[in-house]
Image (cartoon, rainbow, N blue to C red):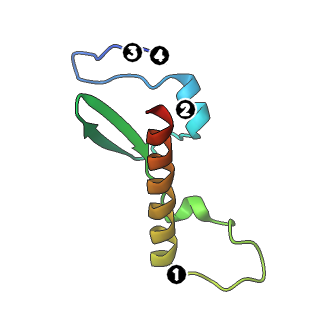
Amino acid sequence: MTSTKISRAFQTTISAEAIRLLGLRPGQRVHQIVEGNRLILEPVEDANALAGSLGRGRRSHSVQEMKAAARKGVAGAGAAGLEEKR
């Protein structure tokens, strides 16, 4: 665990370790989730992040299908991460 300070503009810095472990990118969006007195930042994946992940020779998927799959995967990963910390 690392600590960070909140600036007068209510900004903070994400540690290099967290960025590396989560594969965060500049400009990437994160969900802010408040649970009790905890603030959780959860990466949001967009359809572009899935480009090329389906391989060749497979059926094409709609953008809506890809976004739904990304939401489901991120939600599952977030829930699994919360369970590990308890």
Q: Secondary structure at mark 3?
A: loop
- The residue lying at 60 percent from left, 63 percent from top is 50
Q: Are marks 4 and 3 in contact (CB under 8 Å)?
A: yes
Residue denoted by label 1: 62
Q: Position of residue 63 (x, y in %)?
A: 49, 76
Q: Residues within 10 Å of mark 1 (few under 14, many from 20)?
A: few
Q: Position of residue 67 (x, y in %)?
A: 46, 68
Q: Secondary structure at mark 4?
A: loop
Q: Position of residue 13 (x, y in %)?
A: 41, 22
Residue 4 in which image quadrant = top left
Q: Nearer the viewer, mark 4 or mark 1?
A: 4
**What amino acid is labelled 4 in the image?**
Thr
The first of marks 2 and 3 along the sequence is 3
**What amino acid is labelled 3 in the image?**
Thr
Q: Position of residue 72 (x, y in %)?
A: 46, 63
Residue denoted by label 4: 2
The first of marks 2 and 1 along the sequence is 2
Outermost residue toward the right?
57
Q: Is residue 84 above or below residue 51?
A: above
Residue denoted by label 2: 19
The first of marks 4 and 1 along the sequence is 4
Q: Is residue 67 left or right of residue 5?
A: right
Could you tell me how far apart the alpha carbons at marks 1 and 3 are, in whole angstroms? 40 Å
Could you tell me how far apart the alpha carbons at marks 4 and 3 are, in whole angstroms? 7 Å
- The residue lying at 47 percent from left, 16 percent from top is 2
The first of marks 2 and 4 along the sequence is 4
Q: Is residue 41 left or right of residue 37?
A: right
**What amino acid is labelled 1 in the image?**
Ser
